[in-house]
Amino acid sequence: MQRRQVLATAATALLPLAGCLGPETGDDEPTTTTEPTTARPTTDEPPTRPTYEGADIEVLNVDCGSGDETTATAAVENGTVVVRGTIIGNNGCYVATLDTIIHDVEAGELRVVVRSVEKAEDDEVCIECLTAIDYAVTARFRGGYPHNVVVSHRQDSKVREVATVALPRES
């Protein structure tokens, strides 16, 4: 009884090979595949493009200013992209927040929009002056970093591009 079961299992396993053992005649029609033939990386291989993993913003300083202090720079520090800049606030209760961050993988570009917003309590009195708000945005990537960083500032309802920085190529 067990011998029949073993033979049936073996016959079923070898069935897909039936007809494949004979000599090739060349009469077969060519086949077309629609699947890509390029090798795909396994999970053990490092990614070929950087992967965005998140960002944080830190307000470094808030002080009265002239309103002309809007600046931004970007650099790679310890494997992360760091954007430092100054945005203008309407009074002493304004802070810098991360409005939008977009990593365009195809273009190799990181777009950062920093926004100045009022963070005052109902009973808080704010210094009445235009404020220069110094900030630092730290963007984390895996497998490298983008080639360019474009920094914009959103004040009230206006967005203004402040800087475009080319980052050094990885070695």
Image (cartoon, rainbow, N blue to C red):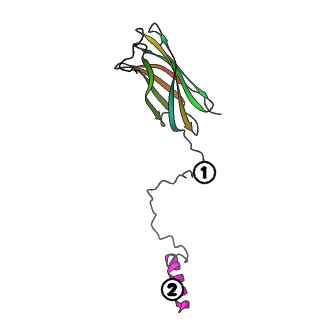
Spatial separation of the CA atoms under disc 1 and disc 2: 40 Å
Residue at far top of view? 66
Q: Where does residue 123 sit, x and y in percent of width and height?
A: 36, 17
Note whether residue 170 is visible: yes
Q: Where does residue 154 sit, x and y in percent of width and height?
A: 40, 21
The residue lying at 51 percent from left, 37 percent from top is: 52
Within 10 Å of the Cα at label 2, are there few (<14), some (14-19), or many (20+) other Cα atoms?
few
Identify the amino acid type marked 1: Asp
Identify the amino acid type marked 2: Ala
Q: From the viewer's perspective, tell me whether residue 3 is left or right of residue 114.
A: right
Q: Which mark is residue 44?
A: 1
Q: For the magenta stretch, what is the residue range?
A: 1-30
Within 10 Å of the Cα at label 1, are there few (<14), some (14-19), or many (20+) other Cα atoms?
few
| Residue that badge 2 annotates | 8
Q: Is residue 163 above or below residue 2?
A: above
The quadrant of the picture occupied by the C terminus is: top right
Question: Which secondary structure, mark 1?
Answer: loop
Q: Where does residue 81 sit, x and y in percent of width and height?
A: 56, 29
Q: Which mark is residue 28?
A: none
Q: Where does residue 30 sit, x and y in percent of width and height?
A: 46, 64
Residue 74 lies in the magenta stretch:
no
Which of the pair 46/78 is nearer the observer? 78
Which of the pair 54/108 is nearer the observer? 54
Q: Upstream in the sequence, badge 1 or badge 2?
A: 2
Q: Nearer the viewer, mark 1 or mark 2?
A: 1
Residue at far bottom of view? 1
Residue at far front of view? 123
Q: Is residue 154 above or below residue 139?
A: above
Question: Which secondary structure, mark 2?
Answer: helix
Note whether residue 108 is visible: no
